[in-house]
Amino acid sequence: MMNAMRSWVKALSVSGRVGLSLVLLWLFLAVFGPFLAPYDPGAFVAHDVFAGFTTAHPLGSDYLGRDVLSRLLSGARYSVGLALAAALVASTTGTALALVTAVSPRWVDEGISRFVDTLISIPSKILSLVLVAVVGSSLPLLLLVASITYFPGAFRIARSLAVNLAQMDYVAVARCRGEGAVHIALREILPNMIHPMLADFGLRFVFIVLLLSGLSFLGLGVQPPDADLGSLVRENISGLGEAAPAILMPAIAIATLTVGVNLLIDSLPGRGRRIAGKE
Amino acid sequence: MAGPATRGLLATALPLIGKRIASGALTLLLVSLVVFFIAQLLPGDAAQEMLGQAATADAVTALREKFGLDRPAPERYVRWLLGMLTGDPGYSLVANMAVADVIAARLPNSLLLAALSALVSVPVALTIGILSAMHRDTRLDRGLNVATLSMVALPEFLVATVAVLIFSVQLRWLPSIALIPADASPWLVLRSLAMPILSLSVIVIAQMARMTRAAIIQQLNQPYVEMALLKGIKPARVVLTHVLPNAIGPIVNAMVLSLSYLLGGAIIVETIFNYPGLASLMVNAVTSRDMPLLQACAMIFCTAYLLLALVADTAAILANPRLRNR
């Protein structure tokens, strides 16, 4: 196991290893960050607002004199956690629907595909804005909005994989054996599409981090007192004129997270150069 | 190409393009259903919202009748759709104006911003894409790959805030707010638009350059390129005179598709610079839950997106004889 992982890491390019380290760092910070935070993220601890880098406050203080590092660590938990959950829902939904279309009659496939094509031709930010206007932006609903916005992409990839796999000889053999549709979908087709779908999961994650932090930046995402990294940029926007670290640091934090995932996925063996951007 | 050949091309390409237009129109119709349906999920209705909780039931009923809100949903959908098609998408309750008027004031600004950003990003992206394709797998290509790979994953507000920090806080060259007085000179307009254009271009260039590179590399792998190289033609000349004419379809396709990134990017960029465009209008419509305005904005963005896809498809059809025979 350890050896397999070591050779897997060795196969990565330099930029891939940088990406992997960034991803691991952010996963670690999302889980343990709040325990490492020097202060309570909500406490007014600094004498100054928009202070620069000091030993007491390594990343400065925000517009109310709170510690930026502590708030960033707590914000990372929201950004990473929400995006992971939403990407998981989006990828699972997309894959499940794709498996359904692969083993169902043609009209089911056509119905689902037509519906998903419609959703895909609504630019993702526009779709999420309309959804947020209607359902609001509590945490569970943001998760739902992000999943609805990005499951169509996962479905498209999964469907093209599943349709090809359904033509394979071993699937035909399973059919002749008299296996049911559920067995064929889960035991024959699904295991062979796991790897590309995992890489796609990484892309969904990047899309969703960017979407949710963008919404929070517009004031339409995570609502106070909760704050993700995008909210931190928004609430400190008045510090822009002073070049306060409070506004730059959260934005840079998001960038290292998304760029890290992109670099990692790009260097995965056998991947075309599919990478995530701002759709 | 001679006359008859051109006519042959058009004869085969036109039905294909017609088919794409029809399928785009169908998609747009379905999109309008989705947008209308989502808006129906909102609890309460516009009449109630407008008059507030204190309104008498009679007043609400009267207003509902006036706006046709008492009709069944399918009828309201058809009315709304016909309204959109005839340029009357309803009444904005928050702005207290016809939606068409609100949008008419904003749309030209957004189009100007998008056009100027495209003007800046296309040549830059083309250069980066060609350079990295020509120097494939060299240090230059790998460097550009990591750079564009990182750029596509940057949040838009990071790009915009860094631009503000550099150009208006540190260097004090440019204004950080893109408000344009009505009588501004073209120079002043350009100056106040410089940073929004810069931010949008950074967002689009990376994606565009990557897709251009892929399109050119696909051509470079063709046997005719090897043939030309074996005959001793210089690589730069091969790319310029042999590869580029053949790759023009895929490149235009890639460029136009990347331009759709402008739609999403504009939402953040227009908001950050207080630019009076359609995207910031849409964000305001979300904040104030102004559904008629929001639906109209959403439909405009979706139409723009589908139009871009249609143009990209058409370019691919016209440039690729194999697609035409399908």
Image: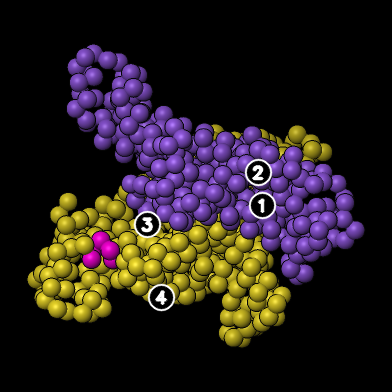
Chain colours: A purple, B yellow
Q: Are marks 1 and 4 in contact (CB under 8 Å)?
A: no
Residue span colored magenta: B216-220
Chain label for disc 4: B
Residue B53: x %, y % from top left: 79, 38
Labels 1 and 3 share a subunit: no
Asked if labels 3 and 4 touch by Cβ distance under 8 angstroms, the answer is no
Q: Quadrant of residue B217?
A: bottom left
Tell me the residue at 50%/74% (across/down). B116
State which tag comes first along the sequence, 4 or 3.
Answer: 4
Circle nearer the viewer, 1 or 2: 2
- Whether label 1 touches label 3, CB < 8 Å: no
Q: Position of residue B98 (x, y in %)?
A: 62, 57
- Residue A267 image position (x, y, % from top left): 41, 51
Q: Can residue B101 be spotted in the picture? A: no
Residue under numbered circle 2: A29
Q: Residues within 10 Å of mark 3 (few under 14, many from 20)?
A: many
Q: How many angstroms separate mark 1 from mark 3 (CA)?
A: 30 Å
Q: CA distance from mark 1 to mark 2?
A: 17 Å
Judged from this view, the residue extending furthest toward the left is B4
Numbered label attached to residue B309: 3
